[in-house]
Image: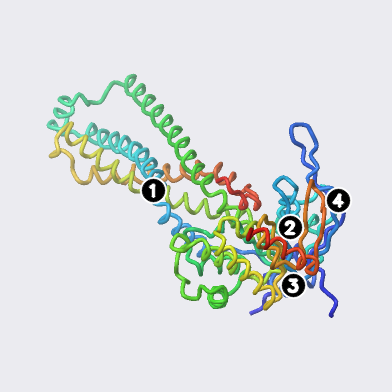
């Protein structure tokens, strides 16, 4: 195998023909990075679980309110008299245009606020896990890790955690919403088709939103981690 | 005697910090040469600038003025990528607090610098196992740091420092978190590596036990080298230090 293809221009400029330097590269293969993140997740189960629950709860909220709206919308569109009667009883009949708009606005506010809270909460937990690992990150840098390796490790870790928590949260939210609308009206009125369509509509959206939020929330802590200096490895007070 | 290869050279190195509007001179113009295969101890009280000097020699900090050459490379001229490469391939670090990656086994810790260096995985595993055997932990490849004693962890850290055959090994208070006996074993190991493999070792320490293993001791006070003692001078002194310890 030829090593010359790996040779970096910038380092060969400085190091020239330094003896014993066959390859002038610093690398972290993706497979290895994923392995490190998985090991880290297992080792720090407690902290990962807190972040997981935090994301899952918020995504469940998104998913359940979206599913709820979707199912109610489908029921309201139904021509079936029994369905309309059940909606009447549950006080969930189609509202007039003005109050529907008001409700929609309220719903949006609530979603935006909870997204914001979620963002702050996740940022905080990830930031804590970064400060816990000051010495570890410093050590990685002493061993030759580039800033972008640290970025890679933290992004993989948080994106995986965010995606897993979002999927779990979305599923929980859909189940909750189906139960809730069922209890509110009557389970007999909810066809599998309506529920599945609602789930298919809201599940991926809520999960994508949760994952996106987690990745957004991890940007600042990741920058903090990447900017740490190798000399931080020497700190004895953390 | 063959001509000795210069491995670290500092020229009129100064380091100043601005703290609360006041300029603090951590280093006041130090010129020093360290040769390949030497065991150097940097001694001095805390706040003497010992750590500052040590960090500059180790490529962790750049001097305010003056030059630091590591293996003929002026570290002040390096960009972040080149510095990372230097740390990866040219410098081995040994820490007071061991700093093994807690989620990794002993072998994974030792092979990590080789992963960064792009070594073939099989080759890295083989070499990692050989290095762990060299430090007397051939039976503990799959142990996690938490399953090992402090002395064992420090041995793993020493094996990790040697992974990419660095030009220099920097040890920051390597015995600081170890008891007397284990500390002594670690010093013996470092000395053995120096004698048998020609490894260059630079330590910053308070530990008087280290004097015994050192080729030269650099005493630092108030940001300046106050004394450099060679092996011969040390031999005379060690008697009195041992005597004091026993008293």
A118 relative to B113, above or below: above
Q: Earlier in the sequence, mark 2 or mark 3?
A: 3
Mark 1 vs mark 2, CA separation in Å: 42 Å
Query: Pointer 2: what residue?
Result: B42
Using a 10 Å C-alpha cutoff, classify the residue at mark 1 as few (fewer than 14 neighbours), some (14 to 19) or many (20 or more): few
Point out the frontmost of discs 1 and 4: 4
Q: Is residue A84 visible?
A: yes
- Same chain, marks 3 and 4? yes
Query: Pointer 1: what residue?
Result: A46
Q: Position of residue B164 (x, y in %)?
A: 64, 70
Query: Pointer 3: what residue?
Result: B37
Point out the frontmost of discs 2 and 3: 2
Query: Pointer 4: what residue?
Result: B29
Q: Earlier in the sequence, mark 3 or mark 4?
A: 4
Q: Image point 57% across, 64% down: which residue?
A: B157
Labels 2 and 4 touching (C-beta < 8 A): no
A57 relative to B203, above or below: above
């Amino acid at each position: 195998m030829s090593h010359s293809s790996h040779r970096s221009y910038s380092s060969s400029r400085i190091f020239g023909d330094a003896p014993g330097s066959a390859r002038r590269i610093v690398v972290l293969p993706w497979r290895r990075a994923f392995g490190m993140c998985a090991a880290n997740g297992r080792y720090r189960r407690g902290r990962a679980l807190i972040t997981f629950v935090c994301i899952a709860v918020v995504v469940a909220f998104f998913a359940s309110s979206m599913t709820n709206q979707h199912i109610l919308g489908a029921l309201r569109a139904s021509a079936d008299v029994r369905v309309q009667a059940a909606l009447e009883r549950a006080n969930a009949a189609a509202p007039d245009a003005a109050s529907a708009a008001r409700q929609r606005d309220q719903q949006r506010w609530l979603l935006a606020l909870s997204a914001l809270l979620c963002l702050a909460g996740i940022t905080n937990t990830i930031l804590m896990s970064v400060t816990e690992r000051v010495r570890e990150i410093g050590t990685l840098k002493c061993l030759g890790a580039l800033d972008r390796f640290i970025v890679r490790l933290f992004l993989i870790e948080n994106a995986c955690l965010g995606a897993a928590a979002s999927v779990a949260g979305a599923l929980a939210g859909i189940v909750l919403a189906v139960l809730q609308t069922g209890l509110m009206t009557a389970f007999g009125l909810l066809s599998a088709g309506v529920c599945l369509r609602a789930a298919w509509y809201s599940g991926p959206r809520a999960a994508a939103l949760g994952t996106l939020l987690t990745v957004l929330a991890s940007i600042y802590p990741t920058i903090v981690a990447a900017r740490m200096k190798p000399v931080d490895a020497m700190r004895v007070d953390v | 005697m063959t001509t000795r290869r210069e491995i670290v050279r500092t020229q009129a190195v100064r380091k100043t910090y601005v703290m609360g509007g006041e300029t603090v001179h951590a280093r006041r113009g130090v010129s020093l040469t360290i040769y390949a295969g030497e065991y150097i101890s940097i001694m001095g009280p805390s706040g003497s600038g010992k750590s500052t000097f040590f960090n500059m020699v180790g490529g962790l900090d750049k001097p305010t003025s003056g030059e630091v050459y590591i293996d003929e490379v002026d570290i002040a001229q390096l960009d972040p990528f080149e510095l990372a490469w230097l740390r990866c391939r040219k410098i081995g670090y040994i820490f007071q607090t061991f700093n093994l990656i807690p989620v990794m086994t002993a072998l994974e810790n030792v092979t990590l610098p080789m992963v960064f260096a792009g070594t073939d995985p099989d080759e890295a595993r083989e070499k990692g196992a050989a290095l762990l055997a060299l430090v007397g932990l051939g039976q503990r490849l799959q142990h996690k740091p938490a399953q090992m004693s402090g002395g064992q962890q420090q041995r793993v850290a020493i094996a990790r420092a040697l992974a990419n055959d660095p030009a220099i090994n920097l040890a920051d208070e390597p015995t600081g978190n170890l008891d007397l006996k284990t500390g002594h074993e670690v010093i013996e190991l470092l000395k053995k590596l120096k004698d048998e493999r020609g490894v260059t070792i630079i330590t910053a320490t308070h530990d008087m036990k280290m004097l015994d293993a050192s080729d030269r001791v650099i005493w630092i006070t108030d940001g300046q080298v106050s004394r450099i003692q060679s092996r011969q001078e040390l031999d005379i002194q060690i008697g009195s230090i041992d005597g004091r310890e026993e008293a």
